Every structure is written in structure tokens, then in C-alpha cells.
Amino acid sequence: MKYLIPVSCSCGESFAKDVVGTQVPETVYCPRRGSPIHLVAPLGNVVAMAILSRARTEFENGDWTLTVVLGAMGVECELVFLFMKWSRLDYEILSNRDATDAEEEAFEKQWRDDFRTIAAKLDKVSNLLTGQAFDSFLSQNSRLLQDVRARYSAFNNYKSAKEFFIEELCRKRNKIVHSGKIDFQKSDAEMCLTLAMALYLILIEMDMTRRTTLDAQFDAKKK
């Protein structure tokens, strides 16, 4: 898959670099000065980053429908990545050995069979990473919703943040994939891209919360 990654030079120049697959180039060159810029491979789920980057590219190219599909897909990709990552780590910490291929397949089966709806997936990952349901975590981290609240007054029409994201992002994606609705407008695509990026950043914050908790547990054991 082709996508773009943003690059900034110390001279102030900002540009985008074409990338294919997960092979991020080690060095690119500033178009203004020609000086080399050494890149560090991004941490985390490169595939989710790539899909969301491609969603932004499609939005800029005027393909509103594909923007919606890719935005929702990027979020789902990050959800399963975090579930697999922390299920694996929890197992390995408890058993003091690496998870086998069979155990990895068991985690995948659990994700497919036990968490079929996006609501269940959001709550499962939130509980796994923060010990709280999705809405509970956001109620204590309201800053993560500031931009969404400011941009979309419709947020206040929903009972919860989870319901808002599901209806305004995931349901639109379902209308395309399940019902063949492909006549979305620019405003729909812009909203879906904004919500996908907001959800992605919320998941990154949850991941950081879990890492902080794990670090604290290891530090406590050392004392």
C-alpha cells in the first residue's frame, strides 16, 4: 500500500514522503536545502498509521466515500493491534515465556468471537488498557474530546461519546460496505476523518496509560 508520511526539516520546510508498505526510508532529502534528514521508524502500529494517512490523502483527492471507509478501517486496525499486543504481553508476563503461534491464534479467535460489535470492541480495549469502560475513561479525560465537542454540536445529541463515534463514523462505513451507499459528501468525509483521528489519539492515550501502569508495577517490585 502506498501512503504519505509527514517530514519536517530543521530549516522549517515541511513536506510529505511517499512510502510503500512498512518500509520507511532511513534518509530523505529536504527539497529546499537538499540536506539529508534521517528518519526513525515510527513506534506502534504502522499499518493503522498508513491507513489513516491514506484516508487523508483520499480526502484531499476528493474521494469522500473511500475516506469514510479508510478512516473507520484505521481505527479498527488499531483496536485489534492493541488487543493482540496487550493480550500477548499479559500472557507472557504471567507465564514467563513467549506466546506460541497457537496462543496467538487463540487471542485472534477471542477477538472475532467474543467482541463482534464496535461497541464491545471499544469497551474491551479500554478495559484492557485502563481498567475502565470507554465512556468512563473519557469522562475522566475530557480534554481528549475538546476538539470534537468544539467542531460538532451534534455530539451533545448523543447519550455518550461511544454512541457518537459509532453512529457518526462506524455506521457511515457500514452503510457503504453493507448497503452500497456511496454518495457521501465532503462534509461527511471531513467529519469521519476528524473522528477517526480523534479515536486513534484516544487509543494511543489508553496505550500510554497501560504502559505507565506497567512501569509502576515493575518499579514497585524492585523496591
Image (cartoon, rainbow, N blue to C red):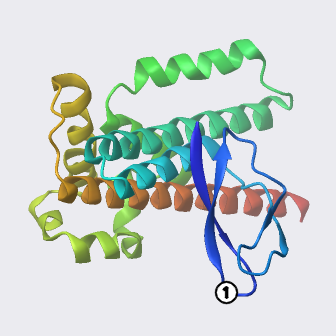
Q: Residue at x 49, y 41 (%)?
A: 79
Position of residue 26 relative to residue 112, above or below, is: below
201 or 60: nearer the viewer = 60
User: Which amino acid, by three-letter code, is at mark 1?
Assistant: Gly
Position of residue 39 relative to residue 165, above or below, is: below
User: Quarter-wise, where is residue 117 in the image?
Assistant: top left
Side of 17 where 63 appears, left or right: left
Q: Residue furthest right?
A: 222
User: Quarter-wise, where is residue 179 in the image?
Assistant: top left
Identify the secondary structure beneath mark 1.
Answer: loop
Q: Residue at x 40, y 27 (%)?
A: 115
Side of 74 where 21 appears, left or right: right
Query: Where residue 55 sits in the image (x, y, percent)?
Result: 42, 49
Number of marks in the rendered image: 1
Quickly name the residue at label 1: 12
* Residue 131 shows in the view: no
Q: Residue at x 38, y 47 (%)?
A: 71
The quadrant of the picture occupied by the C terminus is bottom right
Q: Residue at x 77, y 24 (%)?
A: 99
* Residue 61 shows in the view: yes
Query: Where residue 18 sits in the image (x, y, percent)?
Result: 64, 52
Query: Where residue 112 sits in the image (x, y, percent)?
Result: 45, 20
